Image (cartoon, helix red, strand yellow):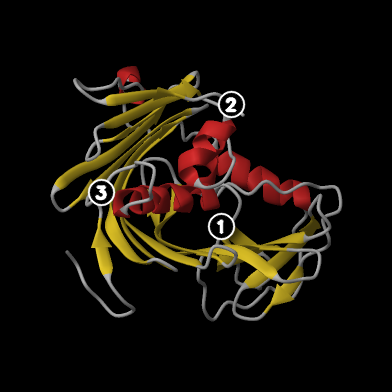
Amino acid sequence: MDRGAGGTVRTLGAAGLGSGEGPVRRAARGCWLQVGALLVLWSAGCGGVNCPTRTRIDIAQLQGAHVQSMAGVHSLMAEARVDQRGPEGRVKGTVRMILQRPDRLRFDVMSQFGPVALLTSDGVRFAFSDLSASRFVEGPACPANVARFVGLQVSAAAVLSAVLGEAALASAGLQRPSCVADVGYRFVQPTSDGGEQSFDFAPVSLDAKGAGGAALDLVRVTLRDADGAEISSVAYSEHALDAASGVRLARRVHLRDLRRESDTVLRFKRLEVNAEVDPEAFVHRAGAGMERAQLGCE
């Protein structure tokens, strides 16, 4: 068991997914929650950034640059250390993920004692194993089933885009960018429920005249409700260029969900772009003697 400031620290793997919610369920749910939050929000810390004196960025350029940089990424293998604080205390562990376009995913939740939980989806079938409780559930690979364990009703297809930080900027309703001190450019677009989503971009480098950014990092996406209150945000930092793909990836991700009073940090220890993946990695079956259950999409 790990302990630290801020209360009790629970390692992954102490109890099961039974009728109550033991530490494993909380731990597994925490790991899935951070990934689900990534599907909606992204952010990266950026200090001391100044906007160019003349803004020469339009929506088409912004979208095009991101699409082009990410288009060559077909799969991602990653391992991250997870540290989550919430109303029920603190959870620490490791999650290993394999993500492949368009809609395949695998998450292995680990504790210091070994595997704790496993989630897979091949785009058709969804399966989740709580290894410590010897319980297995499966069903269609629909957002409702992903939501049971991620915490947000999202599709598997969006996971890789979110981890990469691909920004879905809609041209309709998107305002002209403003300059935010120590951040860079901020774009704002309305949400369907009357709230707004803001996208912050920081220039990675500027030309000699300060006329524009040679490249942009998506550094923050914040979701607010109709009253302007922040719902959640995610912060990326420690970006590094992946030489093989030419994509800048963050090594540290900080997620905040104010409604769930959750604060989560993922520190990526390994990121491998376009690794060869066996299709069987996205399918798993119940082990001998495991309790089994079927899930629908409602």
At label 1, counting other C-alpha atoms closer than 10 Å, the crowd grade (few under 14, some 14-19, many 20 or more) is many
Extreme left residue here?
Answer: 113
Q: CA distance from mark 2 to mark 1?
A: 27 Å
Secondary element at tag 2: loop
> Residue at position x 59%, y 66% from top?
203
Residue at 69% x, 76% y is 180
Q: Position of residue 144 (x, y in %)?
A: 58, 34
Q: Mark 1 to mark 3: distance in Å?
A: 31 Å
Nearest to the eye among marks 2 and 3: give it: 3
Q: Which circle, 1 or 3, is nearer the viewer?
A: 3
Badge 2 is on which residue?
297
State the image coordinates of residue 50 (x, y, percent, origin top left).
62, 78
- Report crowding for label 2: few under 14, some 14 to 19, many 20 or more residues within 10 A (C-alpha): few
**Amino acid carrying mark 1 in the image:** Trp
Query: Mark number for residue 15?
Result: 3
- In this rendering, does residue 94 appear at all? yes
